Image (cartoon, grey):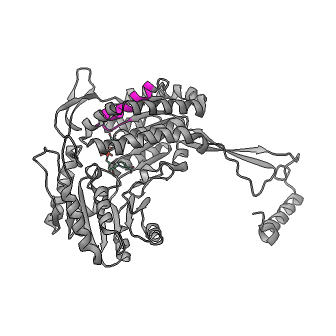
Amino acid sequence: MAIVEPVTSTNGHRRLRLESPATREALGEITVNTAAEVRERIAAARKAQPAWEALGFERRAQIMQRALTILLAQQDRFMDVIIGETGRSRMETLMMEMFPACDSLAYYAKNAERLLRDESPSLHLLKTKKLVISYRPLGVVGIITPWNGPFVLSLNPTVQALMAGNAVVLKPSEVTPFSGKLVAELFAEAGLPVDVLSVLEGDGETGAALVEGGVDKISFTGSVATGRKVGEACGRQLIPCTLELGGKNPTIVCRDADIPRAAKGCVSGAFLNAGQFCCATARIYVIDSVADAFIDHVVQYVRSLKQGQSGEFDLGPAIWPRQLEIIERHVNDAIARGAKVLTGGARNRELGELFFQPTVLTDVTDDMLVMREETFGPVVSIVRVPDEAEALRLANQSSYGLAATVWTQDRANALRLSKAIETGHVCMNDCSITYGIHEAPFGGRKQSGLGQVHGPSGLKGYCFAQSIVLERWTIGQEDAWYPYTAQKASGMRKAMQWLFGSRLGRLFT
Ligand code: NAD
């Protein structure tokens, strides 16, 4: 959804007018929440949180389950809003938003209690004690989300934070605010107590107010530039944050790859959501001996893609005018520096202002913007390499480290290559599907982010792990207590020598 122009309303609030990226028809307006309003919402959430926590996992899960039932029953209504804002196809909306949203609700409703159960690891020393690690909610979690997966990227962290017992204040992107609002509607209908979830309207100013508003954690998904600001603000306030940021994701196509499948997979991986996907395949390194066949297949598949705005189609428009400008700048820079356009390369003006043709480039070099910066559009670059070692070197030559894929029939080789690639996740013979696997920690390395969502560690990130040391049996006076005596010091030396200096003692440490 494109923002046409900010307009000021009579009560002094900024308002933003929005329109469809596909048809440019007006979709409505939002009123930007002020910093004072943000603080009020946080205060209300803080008040509502203890009762929500006290409900316990089972009752919280029942609300997730009700939300799931509503989402399944009203999926078309939800999809209409998301499609209106993104211009995506129905199939892609089902696959990228609806299915993973249902899975998130179902998975955390079923598994959060197990994943956050108290732990009691046995202690190697201090056998008189029992350690209990208890995963306590943080309090109020601020969630800030982007426009490229406007419903699921808002819903999924919200579900995790809520199931862990937190209250949530969510700030969806100003580019797709109505998809973010759906999260509030869904939970209100499912019976979530008032103020446990608040969804704000607004842009960067509102996001910054949320970060500074006194929350206990920020879960941020968005660009590197904004992520850095959010991380700095959280650091200053000493509150935790997770930063899920951008990528310039490499793919390695090995000599033994199933070439037609690899080509088809790379095309899907590159052009999903018209390339507006943080894990989109952007840089393909293909071994020279299979490169001709691979490139032929890629070009053939890309030319068969249907771009459109109604009925059945594969690719929609750029969701945001500013993104289209970036895409165009990257492609023009590549062409000016000698890249070859195998297909695409320009806007698809027949369809509308925001449509860019699916584009395949070769003869690209590392100094081109399209190889260095996130394009976030329907553009993929292919580089021929002599061997896997060179593919790895080039794949890792990036300031980003989000996702990668490898195409080979040899699983051992896939594992070896994956471990050598400096990204948060790697998939073999498939597009980057890790975000859809709730058991898998998801996060970026280098500039692609900080911390992880999903997996047991992601869910635990919405809690603090409290260590509680209980007594198993008492021995009256502890040796380490006062008074300090020469005899106690000598006893401690002997214990130290035996524990850390003898073979028998080492069995205990
Ligand atoms: P963005 O950084 O411009 O905005 C993200 C959110 O931050 C929006 O809600 C925005 O209003 C808010 N914001 C802006 N300035 C802020 C500030 N100073 N303080 C707090 N909040 C502020 O990103 P975008 O253009 O909306 O999204 C695209 C980016 O998101 C791409 O880089 C993409 O790769 C990334 N992304 C990453 C993941 C991931 O999981 N790693 C997933 C999806 C998208």
The quadrant of the picture showing ligand 1 is: top left
Is residue 216 something that shows in the picture? no
Q: Position of residue 365 (x, y in %)?
A: 23, 70
Tell me: residue 400, above or below residue 385.
Answer: above
Q: Nearer the viewer, residue 456 or 44?
A: 456
- Is 400 one of the magenta-colored residues? no
- Magenta span covers which residues? 171-189
Q: Position of residue 132 (x, y in %)?
A: 70, 45
Tell me: residue 144, above or below residue 282.
Answer: above
Tell me which corner region of the image, top left, top right, bottom left or bottom right, holds residue 300: bottom left
Of the 4 image quadrants, the one containing the N terminus is: top left
At a point 42% along the width and 61% down the height, the residue shown is: 426
Q: Position of residue 71 (x, y in %)?
A: 40, 32
At a point 37% along the width and 47% down the height, the residue shown is: 229
Tell me: residue 72, above or below residue 288.
Answer: above
Q: Nearer the viewer, residue 228 or 163?
A: 163
392 left or right of 301 in image: right
